Each structure stands twice: as structure tokens, then as C-alpha cells.
Image: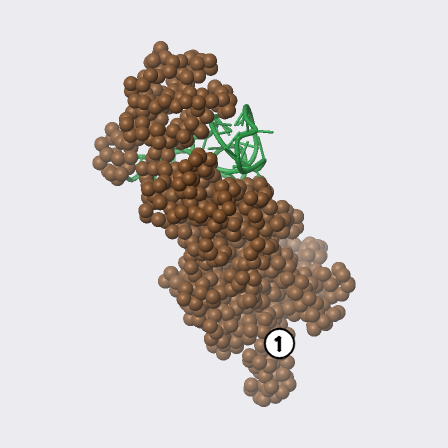
Amino acid sequence: MAITEPKHLPTVYDPAAVEQRIYAFWEQSGYFEAGHRPGKPAFSIVMPPPNVTGMLHLGHAWDNTLQDAIIRYKRLSGYDTLFLPGTDHAGIATQARVEKHLQEEQGVTRHQLGREPFLEKVWEWKQKYQKEITKQIRALGSSCDWSRERFTLDEGLSRAVRKVFVDLYNKGLIYRGNRIINWCPRCATALSDIEVEHVDVEAKLYHVRYPFADGSGAITVATTRPETMFADVAVAVHPDDERYRAAVGKALKLPLTDKTIPVIADTYVEPEFGTGCVKITPAHDPNDFEVGLRHNLPMPQCINADGLLNELAGRFQGMTREEARRAVVDALAAEGALVSEETLTHAVGHCSRCDTVVEPYLSDQWFVRMEPLAKPAREAVLRKELRFVPDRFEKVFLHWLENVRDWCISRQLWWGHRIPAWYCADCGAITVAMDTPDACSKCGSTTLTQDEDVLDTWFSSGLWPFSTMGWPEATEDMARYYPTNALVTGYDILFFWVARMVFTGLEFTGQMPFREVVVHGLIRASDGRKMSKSLGNGVDPREVIEKYGADALRFTLATGTSPGNDQRFYWEKVESSRNFINKVWNAARFVLMNLPDGTKLPPLQMEAMDIADLWILHRLNETITAATEHLERYDFGEAGRVLYDFAWDDFCDWYIEFSKLSLYGEDESRKAQTRAVLVHVLDALLRMLHPFIPFVTEEIWQSLPVSGDALIVAEWPQANPGWHRPEAVRQIGVVMESIRAVRNIRSELNVAPSKPIAMVVRAADDDTVQLFEQTRHYLMRFCHLQSLVIGRETIDVPDPAMSAVVSQAELFLPLADLVDLAVERERLRKEVARLQAEVDRVEKKLGNAQFVAKAPADVVVAEREKAADYRSKLAAVQERLASLGE
RNA sequence: GCGGCUGUAGCUCAGAGGGAGAGCACCACCUUGACACGGUGGGGGCCACAGGUUCGAUUCCUGUCAGCCGCACCA
């Protein structure tokens, strides 16, 4: 591919000029496609399919970044990776969006338009947004296999849906029943339990007198929903409740009507709550429904599907539930039937999509019997066939599986998988089949009508890990990439989606659909609130990418938090990521600028290296080990931090600076080694940063004199045992300590950094003398020295002078004209106090016999070394102070 | 009611049984031949509180307080 001329790399990295070109290069080279490494182990992830409702938000960007980071890490580690992308038709959400759009644009409802023309409109919508979404995923840099892109309504996936429906039906695990479900009057469809959000609402508990039909007094019921009274069929009391024992079996007159209803006894009633009397409305309350079943009560409805009261409500017919509530209360009050009102806070179900109060509604719906499916899923999780990262989510997951109720899967929508059930006009039998049947399975009649309803979106999403791979056909992809390795998703859809994939996967493929679930949190606005359309505090990932580049967004999202926790979005964080990327870019510029045309890099030779080289290679080893471990645990935050610190602190701030001595010097073989080390370390660093910031790393890598086609398919670095050099680390530590000490003194005395000064080093032993001699050039440069004299105890120490103590040496700076002895004494006194505190702390510890006896040996040794170091430093500073007349 | 998360520098967050960290913000200095999206030096924290385990707790355990979340029930 085209390589930017190294010499002309701009000083500021411009992602906009690079990202699209690099993405096209990867994609056209086929690097995203699975299956090109047949001899290698497979590693697969299916992307949680974004809804075709609209654009992607930062939550998607986060989710996608983590998946792509894993995939890129695994690809670099030699796996045949599959990252399978796709989108979800998102039944209710998409249909609602299109309906709203049609209403606004053309002023028509879906019913005015008709089923088929409406669906055409939705397909147009789907095409448009699917295109936008895939564009956004590409802009993020996700290395997914577009040749395997799927959509939940694709023919293949739809067949999988029908197959699962038919099989479950035949096994008796799907049934149709007249039951209480959650009904959203606005969306005009049934909802599953988890699509209902329970919100605490302050309401009124009305106490209403229901008189006995025989005129012998009355009992008082307590209700929050007086508007449902027209569908009351009984009043229940607890069988052991002395107060009402005599009332059981008697008839009550239902106020505002001419009906009579019986008093029944049922243990469902809590005598302590309210008045101890509950009106029973089986068609409008799930608990009352159960009571109704137990007592064989009729189940009339007084509220219609549109949420309005019906003829049963008499003069209240046509009112909304809210209107009816007020009117009924007024009417009851007027009749003297309203005894009292008390305020009550209780949880009321709201439609999770449109926030309308959900109506418990008795209707014919399809259900999945959950107990037989949830049980094996639970057991498999307990057998650790599925691992959650972080593991605390396992508990939440199990708890849900233990308490799940039957799943209502029919939706009164048009957009989705039509339920493959046909009703016979002649005998009423139901025929359930994969393909449109010719005749009724029972009577052979050809007068069949298909169920009008569609399936819950999550019914098809639940098959996603295998329906996308061609199931129910025994495809090669199924064999090679299923079960998938990891599923990455937010904790908010653990029940909606993960649970359903798990039990359908087990039921139909006999296997967990994935081995690990990597759970992340939610992205929030900077004030900690959820990002939402209504608050208008959402951030568009495209805007972030435009301003700072996809790499900066990815780095921010991937490293912004610890596993499983939420994170807040701050532009400052993106900016700091951008700065880091720019830092890496400039480090690369530096390296490239110091590789003259035609440079041949020699192999790394440990004998030819100086301690800075040895040190950086040792640090590289440590970094490789740590980054690899963190990524293996999916701990992106820690991996990113380790790489950030190594890149910025070790490589840029120190090694590159050290390297300048050699690069600007005359020794050609030293120069060659330095170049080789620079390139080697940069190369390894780019490989490790690639999963996080793929674009900039690939762009730089293409310019480096290293072999290979592309960074995306290079090899993950390995730590080299031969580079283990703790001694070099210790030695460089002394050099750095010395440089910092001198800089500190210069800064405190306001000595201009550019002003050369003299320095005398008094070392404690010959090894240290040798170390300072060996690193003399570093000290000269980084301390801006005009002279450096190194010796042992006998050396002449300048006077007056500033001084500093480092391990095994004292540094003297004869800044005659600047030294203020009083200030210097004060500085030294503080140093004495600090060191004394350290010595005391360590000695106290070592003086504790228990510590020496029980602490691990290496800890004790380390403490002893610390003690010795502090003591010698303290002695040196004290001596220095004494020599200044203290 | 059950379960979970969080409480560390001004802000956002890491961290780990043995000397308190980063980014941003702040102060001072620096156009040093990769980078001002930079460099150097610096200030700033009884690691929420109380107990316990331990030779040693900011880290593990228990409880308290505060903030947040999930689940269940609710006439």
C-alpha cells in the first residue's frame, strides 16, 4: 500500500487522512475474512446486532470496540478469527419509529396504509439505517467479516426461527393460552415481563364501601384502581380473618352498577393491608386472575385493547383509564361509597419503550414454557460451562433463571417473524408448520388463516449465535466457529438476550452458544446520568471520530473503566487519548527520522548494548507479560494503562532521550544497535497497541523497516527470557535518580536549564564509580553539565555547593553565586526528616520479631535492603548538614 | 423484602495484604535538533466511618452511613 514518506510525516497525526484508507486496505486485502488460516485454532465472536431503529450511540461504540480489541488481539495471537456482524429488525422499536415517521410525513397510520405497503416502508427504513450502521461500524475500525453479515429477518435466519418455533411447539414447550399479559395500550401489543419497567409511583388507595345485597351493612375494600370495578367479580378476604368470617359467601352490591358479587375467602389476601378486603378483577390484574382461576370466577373485561373503558362501564364508557379513575372516584364520593383515601407508593408497570402505564390484560397469546428450558441452563452455568467476566454477574443471571415465568412471545405487530401457526376455519384446530400448510392437520380443510401476530424480537435474537452460522443446516461455519468463544455485551440485556441465547442454544445445539460472557457497563453523560434522547445529552460517536479520530474514541472507551462498571463520557478523556496517539506518532517520527535511507538494521546483540538498551528491553519484557495477562483476562483498562505508561514514560521520556546520545554521536556500531533497539521496541509496542488503536499503529508500522504484510496480521510479541536484566534496571534507576535530583536543585535555585554547571560525584564504592563513568554522557546531557568529576571518599568536594544524596553516591553542585546556605540547610533538614521517618518506619518493622518470623522471606530481605539504603542516605545528608555548620 | 455495585487528590477514575497512583485541572520554569496534542520541576489525599482477622489492612471479613442499580411484592 501507499506509504507516507517518513521524512515528511506531519508533526501532528491527522486521523481523517489515514483511517478510511487503512480500513479499505484491510478490507480489500481480505484480512477480516475468517477461514484463511485453516491450520490455526478458531476464535469467534458474534456481534450483538444493533437495532435498525436508528444510528449507533456511544454504547454501541464501546461494545464494538471491546469486541474488536479482543478479535485483533486473538488475530495477532495466531487464531483464525471470526467477528460476525449484523443487525436486528427490532420489531416494536422499529415499527414505532416508522409509524411515527409516517404520521409526521404523510399523516397516515399503518392501518390506513395496510399491512403490505406498511412493511415496504419499514424495509426501506431498514435499508437506510442498516447502511448507516455498517458505515459507522467501519468508521470505528471494527475488523468484522462483512462477507458473513446477517440480518435477523434474512431468509436463513427466518427458517431458523420457524424451525425453533415448530420444534418447541411439538415438544409442548410453546403453547397458546388465554392469560393475563402485559399490554401496552399505546403500542397496542403484548409485552414480555422484562419489557415492563416498574416505577415507584405515589398513588391513592381508595377505601370503598361495597354494601351487602341484603341490606345488612357493608364491607370496605381498598383499591388503587377503582376504574376496574366494573369488571369486579368478587371481593376476597383471608379465610382466617375473624372480622369477615361471617361475610364469606354473602352477596355484595357492586356500587355504580346493578350487579351483585360474592364475598370469597382466599389466602392470597393479606389481612393487614388496607382493609383486608380485596376486590377481585380477574381480567385486569395478574393476582386476581389467579384467584379467579382458583374460584372458577367469570372474567369480564371493562377496558379494551385501546385502553378505553367499554360498555361494561356504563356511563364511563369511552373514557381513558385516568379519566375513568377520577370520574369513578367522584361518582363514588357522590354516592357516599367513598370512605377514605390514603396515599400509597407502589410500583406501577410502564412500557419500557413508550413509558405508557401497562395494562394487565387477558388475551389469547403464545407462550414459551420456561421451566424445562431454564433448568438445564441453570445447571450448565452451575457446572461452569459458561463463565462471566466479571464473575459477579453469574449470580444475577442464575437468580433470574430461577424465577423466570413463562415467556409471552406473540406481538400484535406487523414487523417481525410471522407466527407459523394456521387456524382452521372448519374445525378450529391449529396447524403449526415450517412452511405454509396446504391443509388443516386435523380435518384436512383448506380454509386456513395464518396467525396475524409476529414473534417477540428476542425470540430471533436468542438464536443469533447459531442462526447466523447457517443453522439448522450443518454448515462448515457451525462446525468451525460454533460455539463462539466470547460474547461481549452490556449488563442491561443479560436477561433480554444472553439468557435466551443460553437456553435456546442448549436446547437446539446441545451446547452453550459461547464460553464466556464479557460484561461491560453503561456509558453515561459527564454528570453521571444516562444518555438519552429526551435529555438531549447523548453524544454522537461520529462527532467524536470526526474531531479526534476513531483511535482516540476507542482508546477512551476501552481503557476508561474497570470490568463491568459504568463510565462517564468526558471530552477531556478523548483529548487525552488523542494526545497519547499523537505521542506515539511522534515517537515513530523520531525513530524514522533517524533511519537514513537504506538503513540495514543489525540483529540485536546483547554484548553490544549499553545499560539503557538493556533496561528498555527488560521493561519491554515486563510490559509484554503484563499486557498479555491483562488481555487474557479481558481487563482492557489495565492492559491499556500498562502500555500507556511504557510508551510514554519508559520509551518516550527516557529511552528516546537516552538514544539521542548514541544517534548524534560518532560511533557507527553503537548507532546501529540503538536504531535496532528503537525499531524493535517500537515494533513490539505497535503490535500491542494495535487492538486499541488500530489505525495509527498500522499507518506507522507500514513505514517501519520490518517484515510482514500488515500489522493487523502480524504476530503478538513474546517476552524474551534472554532480556531479563534486573541489574540494568537498578543501574538506570541510579542514573534517573541522579538526573532528577539535579533537575530538582536547578529548579529550586532557579538555575536556567540552559546554563551549564559543574558536578562532582562522590561514590560509595568502585562499582558505583564505574556506573557513573559508564553513564557520564547521559548525566552530562540531561543535567546540562559543563564538567563532571567522579571519585570516591577522597575526592575534593566543592564548597560552597548544593548537594543531593542518591543510592550509593552524593552529588555536589558548586553553584557558588547561587547557594544560600540558610536555604540549603533548610532543604537538607527536610531531607533528614523525611529519611529519618523512612528509617524509623522500616526499623520498627524489622524490630518486630513477629514480622521477621512470619512475613515471607523476600519481603523481609526487601525491607532490610530498604533500611540499609535509607540509613546510608540519612547518614550522608546528616554529615553534609554538619559540614555546613549545623 | 432479596441481591449487587460504588465511596481513594479539586474533577473523572485505576490500584494492590508490606513504601498512596494516573489523566485532566492547578503553580513555576522551558520555543533542548519527535512531539506545546510537548518537556522539566512542584503543590494537593487520617484511601467514607466503626469494629474484626493478620506480624502488618487503604486492600480481606462484619457492621454503619451515603449514592446508585437490578429483582420480587404491593388491593
* Vertical side of A767 occupied by A177: above or below: below
Q: Which residue is mark 1?
A: A451
Q: Quadrant of residue A763?
A: top left
The residue under the point 61% across, 69% down is A416
Is A778 above or below relative to A811?
A: below
Q: Chain of mark 1?
A: A
Quadrant into which the C terminus of chain A falls: top left
**Is residue A413 or residue A407 the one in the foreground?**
A413
Q: Which chain is brown?
A: A
Q: Is residue A83 left or right of residue A78?
A: right
Which secondary structure lies at badge 1?
loop
**Residue A349: % across, % down:** 59, 57
Q: Is residue A409 visible?
A: yes
The scheme the figure's colours follow is by chain
Quarter location, residue A162 = bottom right
A169 to the left or right of A537: left
The chain shown in green is which?
B
In the rendering, at what x and y percent does residue A559 appear?
49, 46
* Residue under the image location 33 percent in, 25 percent down: A809
Q: Is residue A203 visible?
A: no
In the image, farthest residue toward the right: A106
Who is closer to the viewer here, A282 or A392?
A: A392
In screen coordinates, is A348 left or right of B42?
Answer: right
Question: Foreground: A397 or A57?
Answer: A57
Tell me where residue A877 appears, x and y as whole percent.
Answer: 34, 20
